[in-house]
Image (cartoon, rainbow, N blue to C red):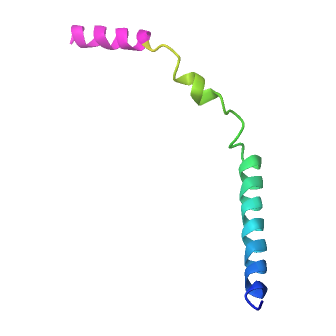
Amino acid sequence: MSALLFLIPIALFLGGLGLAAFLWSMKSGQFDDLDGAAERILIDDDEDAETDDKKSQTE
C-alpha cells in the first residue's frame, strides 16, 4: 500500500508531461499537414530526371 504513495504521483507527473508534450507539438504545428508527405511521394519527378540526363550528356 505504501508503494501507491510513490506510484500515483509519478504516474500523474508522467501523464502531465505527456500532455504537455502533446500540447507543445500541437502549438508548434507538428500535425498541420499529415497528408503532404504521403502525397509528395506520388508526385512524378520525370522532368527532373530528364534535365539531369541532358546535363550529363552535354558535359
Q: Quadrant of residue 50?
A: top left
Magenta: predominant secondary structure element?
helix
Q: Relative to 22, is 31 above or below?
A: above
Q: Is residue 48 magenta?
A: yes
Q: Quadrant of residue 49?
A: top left
Q: Is residue 40 left or right of residue 30?
A: left
The outermost residue toward the bottom is 2
- Observer-nearest residue: 7 or 38? 7
At x 63%, y 27%, the residue is: 36
Query: Where does residue 13 sit, x and y in percent of width and height?
Result: 75, 73
At x 75%, y 66%, the residue is: 15
- Observer-nearest residue: 49 or 13? 13
- Observer-nearest residue: 27 or 59? 27
- Observer-nearest residue: 47 or 7? 7
Query: Where does residue 44 sit, x and y in percent of width and height?
Result: 48, 13
Q: Is residue 34 left or right of residue 41?
A: right
Query: Where does residue 29 sit, x and y in percent of width and height?
Result: 72, 42
The region drawn magenta spans: 46-59
Q: Is residue 27 magenta?
A: no
Q: Relative to 6, is 50 above or below?
A: above
